[in-house]
Amino acid sequence: MSKLLEVKDLAISFNTYNGEVQAVRGVSFDLNKGETLAIVGESGSGKSVTTSALMGLLPKPQSIIKSGQILFEGKDLVGKSNKEMQKIRGKEISMVFQDPMSALNPTMKVGNQIMEGLIKHQNMNRNDAKKKAIELLDLVGIPNPETRMTQFPHQFSGGMRQRVVVAIALACNPKVLIADEPTTALDVTIQAQILELMKDIQKETESAIVFITHDLGVVANVADRVAVMYAGKIVEVGTVDDIFYNPKHPYTWGLLGSMPTPDSDEDELFAIPGSPPNMLNPPKGDAFAPRNKFALEIDGVMEPPMFKVSDTHYAATWLLHEDAPKIEPPASVKKRMQGIAKTGGNE
């Protein structure tokens, strides 16, 4: 498979009144053509900051890319000017934002918002752009697209607004589509429809998707590979099967243990104790150690490297060291894994 995107040792900080917040600390991953990579983790883990960097949307001057590369088709995006990134945003790399109401301009008709990118990036005249915009609205499942073209965002439901945002993101046939928690504000039924829509569109366009979420349950049926982030780092990465059926990092165990399955009781749900660390002063050693009941003495002293589990699966935990005690995932996690196996990932 050809690599479209390679992120290498990316470190991003923010200057605040209280000091330097180390939001992303040495993140590396790649993305192949036609692949969906899910980046999963709690709020504040660095997921959205990482993807904002891919789009060149980090706030200036507060943010600093301290090190690393973002290689898109072999060309480094780090250091490119906003003018240079404008030629890439929307055309080569596009984004579906979390809140469709804030992503859409409330004063512009929906049709004009879709046509805008087509006219700018594809050099279409207004008639051709209008025809293409109608096709896109039809593609994302909006009925009566000709009529809907003339309406404003407030005349659409939440699910329909998100479909419009997807249509805008797809307008210029981007090679990489970033979906930043695109279903968070939607109810479960609409959420499933949007996810199914994105899968169908990916098959048609062969675009690669980076899917950002805090919910592992959403990932099971969408992603090819999963990267689990905690405290600005990727702590485990593997195929969907690796992560769901053979998780190795205690943080991944916690995320799986807190995920309901159809046959689980409410009182069985597992909660990860404590809170994520303050990134103004990241802890020494393994950042997850204070919340990890399986932490070893070395976790408070030295940060674990990425241990190889298989050719597709890596995890940063000292529990994988050859001298570490052999510890199995908790019973609650195993039960979730069995529940996922029964449903085939359809949560």
Image (cartoon, helix red, strand yellow):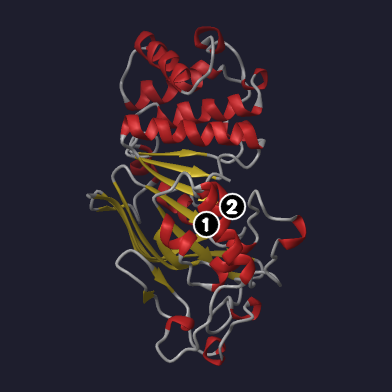
Count of numbered badges drawn on the protein: 2
Q: Quadrant of residue 103?
A: top right
**The disc labelled 2 sits on which kind of residue?**
Asp
Q: Which residue is mark 2?
A: 215
Q: Is residue 324 left or right of residue 262?
A: left
Label 2 packing within 10 angstroms: few (<14), some (14-19), many (20+): some
In the rendered image, residue 304, in percent from the top left (x then y), is placed at 45, 81
Up/down of 51 relative to 227, above or below: above
Label 1 packing within 10 angstroms: few (<14), some (14-19), many (20+): many
Q: Quadrant of residue 105?
A: top right
Q: Is residue 22 visible?
A: no
Q: Residue at x 36, y 48 (%)?
A: 81
Q: Residue at x 54, y 19 (%)?
A: 110
Up/down of 258 relative to 142, above or below: below
Q: Is residue 59 left or right of residue 154?
A: left
Residue in the foreground of this view, choosing between 48 and 318: 318
Q: Residue at x 47, y 56 (%)?
A: 50
Up/down of 46 relative to 141, above or below: below
Is label 1 in a helix, a strand or a loop? strand
Is label 2 in a helix, a strand or a loop? loop
In the rendered image, residue 171, in percent from the top left (x then y), is placed at 39, 26
Q: Is residue 216 visible?
A: yes
Residue in the foreground of this view, choosing between 347 and 209: 347
**The disc labelled 1 sits on which kind of residue?**
Val
Mark pair 2, 1: CA separation: 7 Å
Marks 2 and 1 in Cβ contact (< 8 Å): yes
Q: Which residue is mark 1?
A: 40
Residue in the foreground of this view, choosing between 242 and 9: 242
In the rendered image, residue 78, in percent from the top left (x then y), is placed at 35, 56
